[in-house]
Amino acid sequence: MFEQTFKNIDDILHKDAGCGSELDYVEQTSWVLFLKYLDDLERDKATAAELSGKTYNPIIAPEFQWTVWATPKLATGVIDHNALTGDDLADFVNIQLFPYLKKFKTSADSADTIEYKIGEIFSELKNRIQSGYNLREVINRIDELRFRTHAEKHEMSHLYEDKIKNMGNAGRNGGEYYTPRPLIKTIVKVVAPELGNKIYDGAVGSAGFLCEAFEYLKHSKTLTTTDVVTLQKKTFYGKEKKSLAYIIGTMNMILHGVEAPNIVHTNTLAENLADIQEKDRYDVVLANPPFGGKERAEVQQNFPIKTGETASLFLQHFIKILKAGGKAGVVIKNTFLSNTDNASVSLRKLLLENCNLHTVLDLPGGTFTGAGVKTVVLFFEKGSATQNVWFYQLNLDRNLGKTNALNEKDLAEFIELQKTKAESENSWSIAVKDIDQTTFDLSAKNPNKKEEAALRQPQDILAAMAELDKQSAEILATIKTLV
């Protein structure tokens, strides 16, 4: 039902003059979905309070509650035909509802509350659905959805992930918004965060890394009440520059069960590395920073190694913001391993001298749908210099693409071999002392891969055929003499 509802909403928004792309569809679906989710959450909290003999004070004032302005219902459970629609609905949303919700940002007790998140989300958003009649249809469709049970929330979070993926596949923003979930799960398993760690993604996008880390930790042990609070409020942190990605990331985490995600709408790279103190550092970094972007000169001034390449600036940021002993899994273009410009050489030297780069996962082209860039994943721990690097080259017997995406089975061998850094046809190790100490080039060729048999020259094939013909003639002659 959820999937069909999303399709119906896209059809409605496609007709609206204010929504021109998949990006708009996701953004506008998100805010309406969020208010419906909030209504179900409030009802759950009210029920829990009643069962324990307590009084529940609603977050949202009565006149702005979903069941009052969006879906007032008759005794039969059908939406009242007098419910706001057309210009009346659009005016209420734009002139009253959004300004009311924005105020939560200043009135909330602290930034780690759902009240603050409500204010922050609606400070970033505007209603782009121009027709109040289309908005009425969208509201009616979303009211059909339920977020009451764990199974319903789980299904909704997966469908929302699919919607983000499809938004990326629609073009323009594939790698920017969506990292394949099998790859994220694999990175999380290898990094293996622990309960109590502070986990950070400075290029949060759709928050896939934080969501998967939450799922990983949630199932790592039987959680106590204290553990639940730790996971909700003191574990996951992110920063995101773009408004839409910020909204989607926040919404994605909320749908996965983190009520008040610690995601900040800011340009991570605008922070001067020299200003990062011990209190600002994290135990774990999980990220796929944007690659191919170029940063302005004033942003580059925040970094000791000056470069316009966005991913290289992010890598400096991640190394600096990790605590001593902290662990990281970071996706980056594979050219990072071999680029000869001064910034790339300096950055490789910095990484190898300040961190233990213990594992490099070399991914095939097509891993990121719509992005023809080859990538690697760097796994490192901060605090001691690298002695040996273990490489794994993911060689698949098929080409990856939209209809043939990366899956968890593809990465199973990597996860198993990585535990012991074993050598295989796809894996090998290099000692840092053996690489060029002026370029720190890490683009080692797989010494264990079996070479494809070379194609024979035409004259060799003809000679072999002639030899076979000769042998056949001799066999036939022998048979005739026997007869």
Image (spheres, helix red, strand yellow):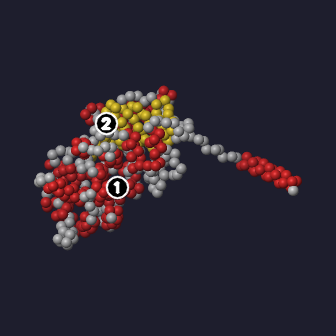
Expressed as whole percent of the image width and height from the top left, the position of residue 470 reads 81, 50
Residue 394 x %, y %:
49, 44
209 lies left or right of 92: right
**Disc 2: which residue:** 283
Quadrant location of the N terminus? Answer: bottom left
Residue 258 drawn at (x, y percent): 26, 49
Locate residue 466 relative to residue 431 in the image: left or right: right
Name the foreground residue: 129 vs 477.
477
Residue carrying label 1: 158
Residue type (three-letter) at the residue carrying disc 1: His
Q: Estimate how packed mark 1 is, as few (under 14), some (14 to 19) or many (20 or more) residues with alpha carbons within 10 Å.
A: some
Q: Residue at x 80, y 50 (%)?
A: 471
| Image side of residue 108 versus residue 152, left or right | left
Q: Secondary structure at mark 1?
A: helix
Helix, strand or loop at disc 2? strand
Q: Nearer the viewer, residue 172 or 174?
A: 174
The quarter of the displayed image where residue 294 is located: top left
Toward which corner of the image does residue 71 lie, by quadrant? bottom left
Q: Is residue 373 above or below residue 3?
A: above
Q: Looking at the image, tell me whether mark 1 or mark 2 is earlier in sequence order.
A: 1
Amino acid at the residue labelled 2: Asp
The relative height of residue 356 versus residue 123 in the rendered view (above or below) is above
- Provide residue 411's location: percent of width, then percent of height: 46, 46
Q: Residue at x 65, y 44 (%)?
A: 454
Picture residue at 60% right of the left edge, 42% below the top:
451
Q: Which quarter of the figure is the C terminus placed in?
A: bottom right
Q: Is residue 294 visible?
A: no
